[in-house]
Amino acid sequence: MGTTFWLVDAFTDRAFAGNPAGVFIVNDFPHPTLMQAIAAELNWSQTAFVKRLSSKEDFEHFHIRWFSPRDEAPICGHATLASAHILWEQNFTKKSKIIFESLAGPLTVTREENDWITLNFPQKKLVECALPPALKQALVTTNGEVEITSVMRDELIYVVTLKNQSDLVALTPNLSIIETLDCRAVSVSAHGREGYDFESRYFAPRVGIPEDPVCGSAHCRLGPLWAERLGKKTLMVYKASKRGGFMKMNILDNDRVTMSSKAITVCEGNLAFDLPNVKADELRMVA
C-alpha cells in the first residue's frame, strides 16, 4: 500500500546542492488536481510524474509532466534530469536513451560515461525589450541598484544581463515586486568566474518558487544568448544560487541545445496511499 517517490538533487554531483526534484513513476497519471496537490505538499520547485509509453529497439519511451507548487510547468530541465536518473538507477530501463513526451514536445535524454546525463531541449528565442520600472526596482543588492546591460524576454520570462558577476551573487531581489510582473519568472545572468562562461540566477515567486537553485529551462534561452555574445557553441555554466550547480552546454544548429550534468538521489519516500486516478471532487477522501 502506498506510492514510492524519490527526491533527487539535479545539476550536481553531491547531495544538498543543485536543484531538488520529486520523481513519481506511475502506471497512469493521477488526476491533475491530485498531482498539483502532491507538488504543493512536497513544496519542491518541481515534482515530476513519469508514465511509461513503450519500449523501442534503441530507446525507452515515457511521458513526463512537471508541477511546481502552484501550477503545471510547460517545461522543466532539472526534474527531467532527475527523472531519467531514477529510471536508470532504479532499473526501470537499461537502455541508454530515453525520449520523454511532454508539453514542450519530445525531449531526448542520454546516459553518458561517468554518470553524466545529457538533455536535448528546444532553444527559446528572445527579443529585446524595455526595462520595466518595477523590475529595475526589484533587482537590488544590499549595496543598492545593480548595473543592467540588457533586457530581453519571451512569452514566459524576462532575461536580464548584469555588468558584474559580483552583483549577480549579491543580488537580493524584491520578490513581492517580481511577483507582480507580467511574466512567469525572471532570469538574471552575467559573465562567469574563472572556468565558467556565464552564471545565472532564476526567480519565480508567482509559481511558488522564490529562487530556483538551478533552472534548466532558463538555459534554453541563456545558452543561445551567451553563445552568440561569446562566439562559441560549447559553454561551461554555473548557477550562482546558494546551493550552486553546473552544466556543460552545446548549442546545436537545429534550434536545439544540450545540457549535460549529473544527479544524485537524496532520499526515497512513500505516500500513505496509492495514486488512483481520482476525480477532483474525491480528493478530500484520498487525503
Image: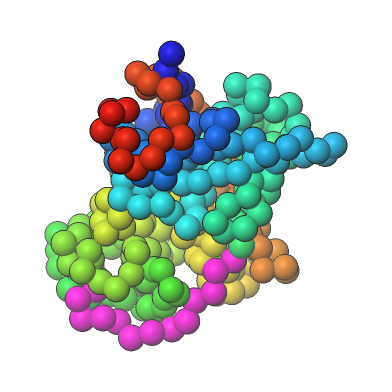
Q: Quadrant of the C terminus?
A: top left
Reply above or below: 26 against 160. above
Question: Is residue 122 in sight in this rendering?
Answer: yes
Q: Is residue 152 left or right of residue 109?
A: left
Magenta residues: mostly which secondary structure? loop
Q: Is residue 111 left or right of residue 287?
A: right
Question: What residue is rendered at 68% in x and 39% in y?
Answer: 53
Q: Is residue 286 left or right of residue 265?
A: left
Question: Is residue 213 in sight in this rendering?
Answer: no
Q: Nearer the viewer, residue 11 or 125?
A: 125
Residue 187 placement: quadrant: bottom left
Q: Is residue 24 shown in magenta?
A: no
Q: Is residue 124 left or right of residue 92?
A: left
Residue 48 x/y as whole percent: 47, 40
Residue 84 x/y as whole percent: 60, 36
Residue furthest bottom in the image? 130
Question: What residue is rendered at 64% in x and 35% in y?
Answer: 52
Q: Nearer the viewer, residue 276 or 169?
A: 276
Residue 142 x/y as whole percent: 14, 59
Question: Number of labelled discs?
Answer: 0
Question: What residue is rendered at 43% in x and 13% in y?
Answer: 1
Reply above or below: 244 against 172. above
Query: Which stretch appears magenta?
Result: 123-135
Residue 46 placement: quadrant: top left
Q: Nearer the viewer, residue 22 or 33?
A: 33
Question: What residue is rendered at 54% in x and 56% in y?
Answer: 103
Q: Is residue 126 shown in magenta?
A: yes
